[in-house]
Structures are given as C-alpha cells and as structure tokens.
Amino acid sequence: MFGKKDDMDRLKDALAATGADMNQFRSWQKLYDKRNRQMEPVQTRYQQARQCAEQAMTDAGRLEALLTGGTQTDPGAVSLLLKDLKRLQNRFDHEFLVSKEDQELHSTYDAILRMGAGAVEDSSQRLIFQSEIENLMVLLGENLEKEAVDPGKLGFFYLNHRDEELAELPPAERFQRVNDIYEREFLMPIRQMVEDALWKADEERKTFQGNSDRKSARFLEAIAILPEKTAEEEDVQERAARVLSEVLHI
C-alpha cells in the first residue's frame, strides 16, 4: 500500500502535469537532497563551536571572579580553569561565530594561556592578566551575540563554496554572500518553475473544473498544491512563495 505523498512529490506531480522541464526539476532536486544531507552536520558544527565559546566565556568569568574576590586567590582553581581554556582553544572557530582571522581575540586568548597561573602571584603581571581576561570576555560576548546562520543556506553554500570565500569579509557581508548564493543558485530556479506552473494551472483549471472524467480528476489532483488566485492583488509571485514555504519550510 502506498503512503501519502509528501509535499515534494506533490510539487513534482504538479510541475509534470503543467508541462515543466522535468530534467531541470530533477537537477534541482539533487541539489535539494544534497543540501538536506549537509544541514545536520553544518548545524552540529556550529552548535559545537558555540558551546565551546560559551564554556570559554564561563571559564573566563570564573577566572575574573577569582582575581577580583576579596579573599586570597586559589592557584589550583586558576590552574584548572586555564587547563580548560587550553582544551577549548580554537574549538570555537567558525566563520559565523569566531573567525580564524580574528587576530585580536586569538592573541588575547594566547596571552592568557602564555601568562598562566604564575601571573596570579606576580604583582607586576596580575593586573595585565586580569585585563586580558576582561578583554577576552568582551570579545567572546560580542561574538556570541551574532545572529546564527541558517543551516539550510550554509549547507547549500558548502556544496560548491568554502570558508576561504568568507574569511576576509565583515560578518554582515558573510551573511549576504551565503544568502545571495542560496537565492541565486537554489531558490531562483525552482521559484521560476513554480511560477510557470501556476500560470499554466490558472489556464488549465478553466478547462478541467466541473468535468467528471478521469483525465480531469487526475489533472486537478496533480495541481492541488498550486493555489488558485483568491484575490486580485495575490499575484503569481506571492503564490509561488507560499508553495515554496510549504514545501521547503522556509
């Protein structure tokens, strides 16, 4: 027994029924499937980097509390926190979180590890050590406040592009580059196909609606995912956007 068709299969049927180039659709669908396979590892990589950055922020905050507390600083506690910071070093690198090219953050991080627990006991180093920790917290905080990248868009980007294309761009331009590539190479082709199918469906419904023959029923069933025009202001572009929102969950 066949199961209920998913939205992608319904869209495929609608495009076929309205005379779309199905070779073109199959080529696009391969990109869609590849993008979907990329989404989970892309999301996992980002979340792992973020968790490491958050833990580094927590460790830095605890270090600051130890250094500014009213009681004598515990060297053993400082050593443990520095050990954890060493473990986390570079594990939060991600072009949409902490760039590998962020020299200010990485040099601050290096300085803290290089100075080590001995800086706590050295009065000439302690204030510098504390200042570096405060700077690190500010820099990590700024990065953690960045908008999270969409895993579907970034997953598609990585099909044919690499981080090197993003490394030297400011954060806002990185988002724009990923969004532009997603729009141009992924959304535009399928959007045009859906818009063309809607035009054809609008014309053909007039022929098939009200008929009771099997051919008419099959056609109307096939194009059911393509919404009819319900208001003068709802143009083909708006309806195509609704279809893609339903199928692609965007």
Image: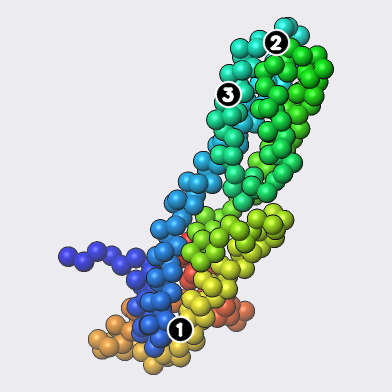
Please give the name of the residue rendered at 69% of the width and 57% of the height, measured from the top-left corner.
Answer: 168
The Cα–Cα distance between marks 2 and 3, rounded to whole angstroms, is 17 Å
Q: Amino acid at mark 1?
A: Ala
Does 218 sit above or below residue 168?
below
Snapshot quadrant of residue 122: top right
Q: Secondary structure at mark 1?
A: helix
| Image quarter (top left, top right, bottom left or bottom right) of the N terminus | bottom left
| Residue 175 visible from this viewpoint | no
Colour scheme of the picture:
rainbow
- Horizontal relation, residue 145 to residue 45: left or right: right
Of residues 184 and 93, the one nearer the viewer is 93
* Precedes in sequence: disc 2 or disc 1: 2
- The residue that appears at 68% across and 39% down in the rendered structure is 106
Q: CA distance from mark 2 to mark 1?
A: 71 Å
- State the image coordinates of residue 140 (x, y, percent, origin top left): 68, 37
Q: Where residue 115 sits: x, y (%)?
A: 71, 24
| Residue matched to label 1 | 197
**Vertical order, 53 against 4 (above or below):** above
Q: Earlier in the sequence, mark 2 or mark 3?
A: 2
Residue 73: mark: 2
For image coordinates 45% across by 50% down, the residue present is: 41
Q: Amino acid type of disc 2?
A: Thr
Mark 2 against mark 3, which lies toward the viewer? Answer: 3
Above/below status of 22 relative to 67: below
Query: Which amino acid does the dot numbered 3 rest on?
Result: Lys
Q: Is the residue marked by circle 1 packed among few (<14), some (14-19), or many (20+) residues within 10 Å?
A: many
Q: Position of residue 172 (x, y in %)?
A: 70, 57
Disc on the earlier residue, 3 or 1: 3
In the picture of the structure, the residue carrying the numbered disc 3 is 83
